[in-house]
């Protein structure tokens, strides 16, 4: 309990672990795992193949190890930062971007699933994504966003 109180006191007024920090944690762990893998590969190639491949893996090891340590540093900086409003703004930006990527992945998935029933295209004027049932020949499309009318083949 005393440890918990101390931890609470230490984190008072600091940003703490948020979603962006967890993301950074995963990235740095991934980098350190890659670094271990490259060390292993450099040792294997040193023994069997001659030095060029071993050297390349050695360099990759340093690169990934360096990036992993750097991101861990950023993680510590963010978690213990007292500038909570700025860190929260970063976290919000991160969540917004993640949501955008997730939405895009979801729509690609939908597009692939429905590829036989629907043709997907973009409005030539505003790039709004539109879909139309397939095998209807040439059709006139009115964009739901900007009202532009164009002709496309289904
Ligand atoms: Zn449009």
Image (cartoon, rainbow, N blue to C red):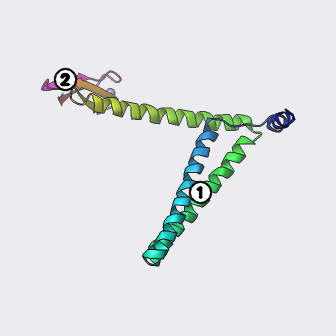
Choose top left, top right, bottom left or bottom right for residue 11: top right
Q: Nearer the viewer, mark 1 or mark 2?
A: 1
Can you tell which mark lies on residue 14? none
Looking at the picture, how far across and down is residue 118, in whole percent?
A: 23, 26
Which residue appears at 54% of the width and 65% of the height? 39
Question: Is there any visible trace of residue 141 in the rendered image?
Answer: yes
Q: Are marks 1 and 2 in contact (CB under 8 Å)?
A: no
Task: Tell me if mark 1 has few (under 14), some (14-19) or many (20+) residues whose alpha carbon lies within 10 angstroms of its own.
Answer: some
Mark 1 element type: helix
Instruction: Say above or below: 29 vs 114.
Output: below
Q: Residue 25 lies in what quarter of the image?
A: top right
Specify the segment rendered in magenta: 133-146
User: Which residue occupies the extreme left position in the image?
Assistant: 137
* Closest to the observer, 78 or 66: 66
* Residue placed under numbered mark 2 in the picture: 140
Q: Is residue 116 above or below residue 37?
A: above
Query: Is 142 one of the magenta-colored residues?
Result: yes
Q: CA distance from mark 1 to mark 2?
A: 52 Å
Q: Residue at x 60, y 45 (%)?
A: 24
Which image quadrant: the N terminus? top right
Q: Residue 143, position in %: x, y?
A: 30, 23
Whether label 2 lies within 8 Å of ligand 1 gets the answer no
Q: From the top left corner, tell me how far across and down residue 62 is, in percent.
A: 58, 65
Q: Which mark is residue 67?
A: 1
**SS at mark 2 in the image:** strand
Q: Residues within 10 Å of mark 2 (few under 14, many from 20)?
A: few
| 59 left or right of 53 in image | right
| Residue 19 on the magenta segment | no
């Amino acid at each position: 309990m005393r440890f918990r109180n101390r931890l609470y006191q230490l984190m008072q007024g600091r940003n703490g672990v948020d979603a962006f920090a967890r993301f950074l944690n995963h990235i740095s762990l991934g980098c350190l795992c890659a670094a271990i893998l490259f060390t292993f590969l450099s040792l294997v190639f040193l023994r069997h193949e001659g030095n060029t491949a071993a050297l390349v893996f050695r360099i990759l090891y340093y690169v990934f190890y360096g990036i992993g340590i750097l991101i861990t540093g950023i993680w510590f900086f963010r978690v213990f930062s007292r500038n909570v409003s700025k860190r929260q703004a970063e976290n919000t930006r991160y969540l917004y971007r993640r949501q955008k990527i997730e939405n895009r992945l979801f729509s690609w998935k939908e597009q692939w699933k429905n590829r036989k029933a629907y043709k997907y295209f973009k409005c030539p004027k505003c790039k709004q994504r539109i879909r139309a049932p397939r095998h209807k020949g040439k059709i006139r499309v009115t964009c739901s966003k900007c009202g532009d009318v164009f002709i496309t083949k289904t």
